[in-house]
């Protein structure tokens, strides 16, 4: 059964400042003086972090260094429960900080978006939480360079908590996992891990930019894209198709209980991201926990063997056209229609020696009088008595010569 707890990625390949250079955060080499500054900032943040006692919530460049604001890790939750978001002090304390998302609580706003803030905001937050602001005097003047600032942002995130409004996450769950013998269990997990690696490699072969993270739940994997753009989210949905196709091919060729039977879920939602302690240091990989992982686990728990369930959601993405300040809001149905248009990128991908000719992905429904199909959503109720709406998804993959691969279950097979 899927676990509705935290999720983390364990496949980031390096640690510390050296690990950030050459990553998607770093577009070019960093000057030696700025690298020295970054290492010094990292050392100071570690001291302020105090083994996880404090969280980084804001920074800003000042003369001869930067200001850094840390608050006790328990303070956010305490503030959220003890103060109403309608409190005049919260709503009118500082316009620049609180105007972005009016419906969010103060505590959530503190960990949303960039941690670079104005001096006025940092001083106001420090007063609100009754903490001191740290002034880091750097060994060299800080150059206002995009790459350097991005790395400072990443260092701040590693020593804090970040709220993410919309992220796509997929959950692959092995049916009946607990009933297998330990050797069969490890073989099935390894088989699924291979399908994940194989699908990832196939997308890279088509020059589809992906930056996936994963967590084993014990009987499956959470997968998400570290990028939260609309294109990254549709790429994750297509990645899910390739994983399921590879698994289906492996099952058709395997004997015994060596290849898992899967049930799968996909959702886009909010979560908090944080970096746990690894030994006595912040880890280089993050955990995610929040609505998206909890909802996914509960949905997949009600999903049938072989079924692909897609949660009902309203997702908010930056406009892919790049217009500053603009956002695109998509429902589940709109997102799947958009994903279908992008599937041509996977044409030509090889599956078990055959090249993909075309792919269809759609949400199922009932046939209408005119012969067309509608899209039907189902209500599922979990063990806690909570209900939510989901869609049944199908994927049809057609190859140049081989038999087609049909993923998911028919509408008529859905138990509801």
Image (cartoon, rainbow, N blue to C red):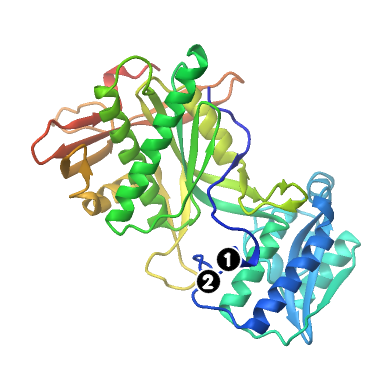
Q: Are marks 1 and 2 in contact (CB under 8 Å)?
A: yes
Tell whether 397 sits left or right of 241: left
Residue at which label 1 appears = 20
User: What is the quadrant of the C terminus in the image?
Assistant: top left
Q: What residue lies at 90% left-to-right and 67% top-to-bottom?
A: 132
Q: Earlier in the sequence, mark 1 or mark 2?
A: 1
* Label 1: element kind: helix
Q: Is residue 339 above or below residue 216?
A: below
Looking at the image, which is closer to me, 88 or 61?
61
Identify the residue at the far left of this view: 401
Tell whether 253 sits left or right of 267: left
One can see residue 170 in this view:
yes
- Rounded to the nearest angstrom, the CA distance separating label 1 from label 2 is 7 Å
* Label 2: element kind: loop
Q: What residue lies at 49% left-to-right and 13% top-to-bottom?
A: 181
Q: Which mark is residue 26?
A: 2
Tell whether 409 sits left or right of 297: left
Image label count: 2
Where, by quadrant of the figure, is residue 367 drawn? top left
Q: Residue 242 at what x, y percent from top left?
A: 31, 40
One can see residue 312 in this view:
no
Q: What residue lies at 74% left-to-right and 53% top-to-bottom?
A: 281
Q: Residue 251 at what x, y percent from top left?
A: 29, 24
Q: Say few, some or many: other residues with alpha carbon within 10 Å of mark 1 (under 14 / 14 to 19 / 20 or more).
A: some
């Amino acid at each position: 059964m899927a676990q509705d707890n935290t999720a983390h990625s364990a496949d980031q390949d390096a640690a510390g400042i050296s690990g950030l250079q050459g990553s998607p955060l770093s577009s070019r080499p960093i000057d030696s003086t700025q690298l020295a500054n970054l290492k010094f900032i990292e050392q100071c943040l570690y001291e302020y972090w105090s083994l996880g006692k404090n969280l980084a919530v804001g920074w800003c460049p000042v003369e001869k260094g930067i200001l850094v604001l840390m608050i006790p890790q328990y303070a956010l939750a305490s503030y959220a429960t003890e103060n109403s978001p309608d409190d005049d002090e919260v709503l009118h304390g500082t316009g620049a900080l609180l105007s972005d998302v009016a419906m969010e609580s103060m505590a959530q706003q503190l960990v949303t978006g960039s941690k670079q803030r104005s001096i006025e905001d940092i001083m106001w937050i420090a007063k609100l939480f009754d903490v001191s602001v740290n002034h880091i005097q750097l060994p060299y003047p800080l150059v206002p360079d995009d790459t350097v600032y991005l790395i400072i942002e990443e260092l701040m995130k590693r020593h804090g908590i970040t709220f993410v409004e919309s992220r796509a996450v997929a959950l692959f769950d092995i049916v009946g996992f607990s009933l297998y013998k330990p050797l069969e269990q490890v073989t099935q997990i390894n088989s699924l891990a291979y399908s994940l690696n194989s699908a990832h490699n196939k997308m890279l072969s088509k020059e589809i930019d992906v930056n996936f993270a994963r967590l084993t739940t014990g009987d499956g994997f959470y997968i998400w894209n570290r990028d939260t753009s609309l294109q990254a989210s549709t790429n994750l949905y297509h990645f899910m198709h390739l994983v399921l196709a590879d698994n289906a091919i492996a099952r058709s060729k395997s004997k015994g209980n060596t290849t898992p039977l899967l049930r799968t879920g996909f959702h886009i939602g909010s979560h908090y991201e944080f970096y746990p302690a690894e030994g006595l240091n912040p880890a280089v990989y993050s955990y995610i926990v929040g609505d998206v992982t909890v909802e996914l686990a509960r949905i997949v728990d009600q999903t049938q063997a072989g079924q692909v369930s897609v949660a009902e959601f309203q997702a908010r993405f930056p406009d892919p056209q790049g217009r500053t300040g603009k956002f695109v809001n998509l429902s589940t149905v709109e997102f799947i229609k958009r994903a279908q248009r992008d599937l041509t990128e996977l044409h030509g991908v090889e599956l078990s020696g055959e090249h993909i000719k075309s792919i269809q992905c759609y949400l199922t429904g009932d046939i209408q009088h005119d012969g067309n199909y509608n899209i039907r959503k189902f209500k599922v109720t979990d063990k806690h008595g909570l209900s939510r709406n989901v869609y049944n998804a199908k994927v049809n993959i057609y190859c140049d010569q081989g038999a087609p691969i049909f993923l998911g279950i028919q509408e008529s097979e859905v138990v509801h």
